[in-house]
């Protein structure tokens, strides 16, 4: 079978195709024929050296995939050949508090990921993919959609009438817009592009702030757009350079949910600003297996169609990664492996 590996962790040029034997499932395992893989910003962070957990070279990248069961090992009772499945981001986090080795087990940085034609995993590491979603759509759910759902449903769950602020047009942010809209929330989106602003409005954003024109967009969201009250939830994907504005935007008693680190500038956080915001700051790491199941239920129940910016053929994986790096996308970038 063909698979991609980052032979070194210096640049995207280190991604190369390898020929590996098709693995055989052992007891309790399934062999997945992979049809589609979606990319996340973390896939760039791993190879460019700014991921939050240690990474080692030589691994197959990517955590998110959808495919079909090609064969099963002894003792597998949940799946049979031909079943459509989607990968679980944390293969051993079934629920409850995350175990301490969680970051040492994730795909792409600590274990082989999914950018391959076949992969063997324990039967618990995949869940059924509904027939209403294509393989390409299903591949977008394990990380981005589940992260958005965890941001909105954990802590203080978002309810109808609340206000949610999202940042940009990446996968997590777009899913946050779609899911928050389905929950009946009001949505303030941010972007620096007029074209992307129109896309955000079309997907349900009630107001869009151009942060290239309004530098203090967080203060603007609070004082102008919410009459001084502030938003109930900030889906914070920007990281060190945006978190201060997120703290300006949030209301007393609201939540800033720390997810990503798209920015590099790090001006630091003033303690009195943090304390004075009156907000809960909650850091999440995607979610457990149950969160993915809930996400798929929410996506299906609301009739949400994942937004896919582009689908690249397997042989053009380099182009897919470079498109992700460009930041010009809206929604998810998918690599079609087979089918």
Image: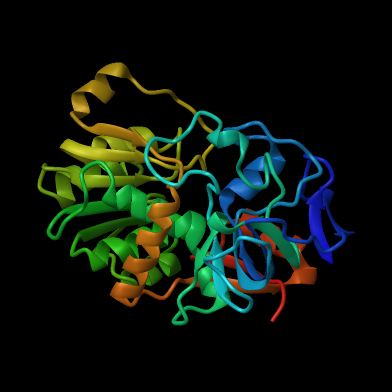
The image shows residue 121, relative to residue 275, as above or below, that is below
Q: Give the percent coordinates (x, y) of residue 248.
A: 25, 35
Q: Give the percent coordinates (x, y) of residue 278.
A: 18, 29
Left or right: 112 as drawn, with respect to 92: right
Colouring chosen for the image of the structure = rainbow
Along the line of sight, the residue nearer the viewer: 146 or 246: 146
Which quarter of the rendered picture does the N terminus lie within?
A: bottom right
Q: Residue furthest top?
A: 271
Q: Residue furthest front?
A: 75
- Residue shown at the point (64%, 47%) measured from the top left: 107
- Residue shown at the point (33%, 77%) measured from the top left: 303
Left or right: 94 as drawn, with respect to 1: left
Q: Give the percent coordinates (x, y) of residue 61.
A: 70, 52
Left or right: 53 as drawn, with respect to 231: right
- Residue shown at the point (47%, 56%) measured from the top left: 144
The image shows residue 154, relative to residue 200, as above or below, that is above
The image shows residue 143, relative to residue 229, as above or below, that is below
Which quarter of the rendered picture does the C terminus lie within?
A: bottom right
């Amino acid at each position: 079978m063909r698979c991609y590996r980052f032979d070194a962790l210096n640049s995207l040029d280190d991604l190369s195709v390898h020929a590996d034997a098709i693995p055989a499932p052992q007891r309790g395992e399934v062999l997945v024929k992979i049809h589609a893989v979606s990319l996340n910003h973390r896939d760039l962070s791993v190879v460019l050296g700014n991921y939050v957990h240690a990474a080692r070279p030589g691994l197959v990248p990517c955590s998110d995939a959808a495919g079909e069961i090609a064969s099963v090992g002894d003792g597998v009772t949940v799946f049979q050949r031909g079943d459509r499945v989607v990968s679980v981001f944390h293969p051993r986090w079934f629920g409850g508090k995350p175990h301490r080795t969680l970051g040492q087990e994730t795909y792409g940085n600590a274990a082989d990921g999914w950018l391959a034609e076949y992969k063997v995993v324990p039967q618990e590491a995949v869940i059924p993919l509904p027939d209403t979603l294509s393989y390409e759509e299903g591949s977008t759910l394990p990380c981005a959609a589940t992260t958005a759902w965890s941001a909105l449903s954990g802590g203080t769950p978002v309810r109808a009438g609340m206000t949610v602020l999202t940042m940009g047009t990446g996968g997590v942010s777009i899913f946050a817009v779609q899911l928050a809209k389905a929950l009946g929330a009001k949505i303030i989106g941010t972007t620096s592009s007029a074209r992307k602003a129109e896309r955000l409005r079309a997907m349900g954003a009630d107001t869009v702030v151009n942060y290239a024109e309004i530098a203090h967009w967080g203060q603007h969201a609070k004082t102008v757009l919410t009459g001084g009250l502030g938003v109930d939830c900030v889906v914070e994907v920007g990281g060190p350079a945006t978190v201060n504005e997120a703290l300006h935007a949030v209301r007393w008693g609201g939540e800033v949910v720390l997810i990503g680190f798209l920015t590099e500038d790090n001006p630091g956080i003033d303690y009195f600003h943090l304390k004075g915001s009156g907000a809960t700051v909650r850091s999440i790491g995607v979610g457990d297996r149950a969160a993915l199941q809930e996400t798929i239920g929410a996506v299906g129940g609301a009739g949400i169609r994942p937004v896919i910016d582009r689908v690249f053929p397997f042989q053009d994986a380099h182009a897919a990664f470079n498109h992700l790096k460009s930041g010009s996308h809206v929604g998810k970038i998918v690599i079609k492996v087979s089918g």
